[in-house]
């Protein structure tokens, strides 16, 4: 497929995003940027959040991981359902009752200012690392498939992508992202379905014969029953539940769009609808992954992991499928990157700078500060993507889940302690507890063979981190005064 043709479609797609951004950002203000004026349509939010939840890493890494782990990722997806139910009926009522713009304000009212700043800081750290890891993967594919042919350096490709995102999020923020995410999710799911249909056609299979072939080759195994295995189904389902609770319910990016819906009831509909759709979408990604491995063997393509899907879509499929793949990949990229930059801007302005509490600043001053923060965060993204480029890990989904285990664990502990306990913490010591817990988990993970023998710690490291934080908070707390 000619890089010129692919570039033409990429530019056309971006112009479409700009048109949507221009339309939705008219008469926007800080309230539009941060919370979408609390007037977002729950159906659009639910559909758009599919793209945000999946990202380019899911689009590439989940299918690529089938060759190694079969359909084991579906165990985590089943855990997602539990997590979404807890978000809908435990966390969302709390956020709506307090009328929050930043969800970390809850920590301020319940535990104290230091706890609040600590929670927001861990979110900022986690989202920067996770979002830039996702961004790196897709930018690398675009670099290799399109811009490398034009002699464009990787850092320039990254800068161009970030400038694109800045242009259409600079004014509208969440108000714009709700609509662009819906558009991008549509393209991403279309690309997924088209690739599945094409491979079935190319291998002269129907769904039934394809499932039989995947079963014969060992690609479709879902449940793993060895308790010592990192893929043990109990560990995976529990990890999936807590990953969702933290990476969605305690994540400002995801909740920023969710609480932009006008009523709690509609927001709960959004989350439950999202949870059901996600199960079927992930299952389709895994099915595609199995098909890709069979198709690669048939075509004699020697590619694995994150490189498998791009290699086949761009080198062994018709031009129209290659174009659809690139558009779908970009559509998976933008919802995770644009939402992250916007949410980080919101969190830093509200939680760290206290923008909404600054009565000495007028709206024009606040907007100017917010825009400068927006640009700064985009620059930080550029730096971290370049760092990931130097590391060049073969499977970014593993990197992202590991980062989440370390950085979202303290958030899990903070929110859980606040909700499940009435005890009052020594607020000044909370940051030290939240730093100590990930450090302890790091040493447990590093020396797990010496500590546990054959027992393997996987995604449940997040639960351990949260539990250590909870215990630490319990130690530095006391019963509330009567």
Image (tube, grey):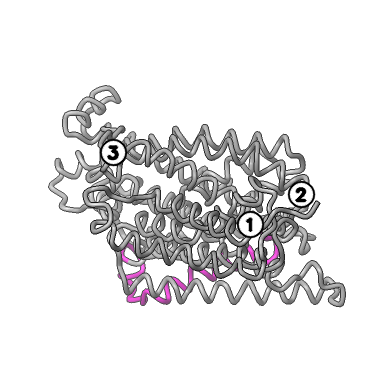
Percent x, y of residue 31: 77, 59
* On-image quarter of the N terminus: bottom left
216 on left or right of 338: left
Task: Tell me the quarter of the picture where residue 366 sits.
Answer: bottom right
Q: Circle 2 sits on which residue? A: 38
Residue drawn at the location 38% of the way across and 49% of the way down: 459
Residue drawn at the location 41% of the way across and 43% of the way down: 191
Task: Tell me the quarter of the picture where residue 330 sits.
Answer: bottom left
Viewer-proximal residue among 204 and 479: 479
Query: Marks 2 and 3: in contact by CB < 8 Å?
Result: no
Q: Earlier in the sequence, mark 3 or mark 1?
A: 1
Q: Earlier in the sequence, mark 3 or mark 2?
A: 2
Q: Is residue 311 above or below residue 263?
A: below
Percent x, y of residue 110: 72, 55
**Mark 3 crowd level (few <14, some 14–19, many ≥20, 10 Å Cα):** few
Q: Circle 1 sits on which residue? A: 19
Element on which disc 1 rests: helix
Q: Which residues are magenta?
A: 144-173
Q: Nearer the viewer, mark 2 or mark 1?
A: 2
Which secondary structure is most common in the magenta stretch?
helix
Task: Tell me the quarter of the picture where residue 73 sits.
Answer: top left
Percent x, y of residue 382: 47, 74
Q: Is residue 193 above or below residue 135?
A: above
Q: Circle 3 sits on which residue? A: 227
Q: CA distance from mark 3 to mark 2?
A: 45 Å
Work out which residue is located at the far top of the displayed protein and give it: 208
Magenta span has 160?
A: yes
**Mark 2 crowd level (few <14, some 14–19, many ≥20, 10 Å Cα):** many
Q: Nearer the viewer, mark 3 or mark 1?
A: 3
Marker count (numbered): 3
309 on left or right of 481: left
């Amino acid at each position: 497929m000619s890089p010129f043709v692919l570039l033409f479609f990429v530019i056309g797609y971006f112009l479409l995003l700009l048109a949507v951004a221009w339309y939705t950002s008219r008469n926007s203000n800080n309230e539009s940027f941060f919370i979408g004026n609390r007037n977002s349509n729950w159906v659009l939010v639910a559909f758009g959040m599919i793209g945000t939840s999946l990202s380019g890493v899911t689009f590439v890494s989940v299918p690529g991981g089938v060759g190694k782990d079969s359909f084991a990722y579906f165990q985590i997806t089943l855990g997602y359902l539990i997590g979404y139910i807890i978000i809908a009926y435990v966390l969302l009522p709390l956020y709506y009752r307090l009328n929050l713009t930043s969800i970390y304000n809850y920590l301020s009212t319940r535990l104290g200012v230091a706890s609040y700043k600590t929670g927001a800081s861990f979110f900022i750290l986690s989202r920067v690392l996770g979002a830039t890891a996702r961004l790196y993967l897709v930018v690398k594919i675009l670099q290799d498939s399109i811009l490398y042919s034009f002699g464009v350096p990787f850092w320039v490709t990254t800068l161009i992508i970030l400038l694109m995102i800045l242009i259409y999020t600079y004014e509208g923020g969440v108000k714009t992202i709700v609509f662009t995410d819906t558009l991008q999710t549509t393209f991403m799911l279309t690309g997924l379905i088209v690739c599945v249909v094409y491979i079935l056609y190319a291998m002269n299979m129907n769904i039934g014969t394809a499932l039989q072939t995947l079963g014969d080759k060992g690609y479709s195994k879902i449940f793993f029953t060895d308790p010592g295995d990192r893929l043990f189904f109990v560990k995976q389902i529990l990890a999936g539940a807590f990953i969702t609770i933290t990476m969605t319910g305690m994540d400002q990016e995801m909740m920023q769009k969710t609480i932009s819906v006008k009523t709690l009831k509609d927001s709960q509909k959004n989350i439950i609808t999202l949870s059901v759709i996600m199960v079927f979408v992930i299952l389709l990604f895994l099915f595609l992954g199995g098909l890709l491995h069979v198709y690669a063997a048939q075509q004699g393509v020697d590619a694995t992991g994150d490189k498998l899907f791009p290699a086949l879509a761009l080198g062994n499929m018709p031009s129209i499928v290659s174009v659809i793949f690139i558009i779908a990949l970009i559509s998976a990229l933008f919802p995770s990157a644009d939402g992250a930059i916007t949410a980080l801007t919101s969190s830093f302005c509200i939680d760290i700078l206290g923008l909404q509490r600054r009565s000495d600043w007028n709206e024009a001053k606040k907007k100017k500060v917010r825009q400068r923060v927006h640009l700064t965060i985009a620059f930080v993204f550029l730096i971290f993507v370049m760092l990931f480029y130097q590391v060049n890990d073969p499977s970014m989904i593993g990197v992202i889940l590991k980062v989440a285990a370390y950085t979202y664990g303290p958030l899990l502990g903070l929110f859980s302690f606040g909700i499940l306990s009435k005890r009052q913490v020594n607020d000044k010591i909370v940051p030290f507890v939240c730093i100590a817990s990930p450090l302890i988990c790091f040493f447990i993970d590093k020396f797990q063979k010496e500590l546990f023998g054959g027992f393997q710690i996987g995604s449940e490291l997040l639960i351990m981190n949260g539990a250590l934080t909870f215990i630490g908070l319990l130690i530095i707390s006391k019963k509330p005064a009567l």
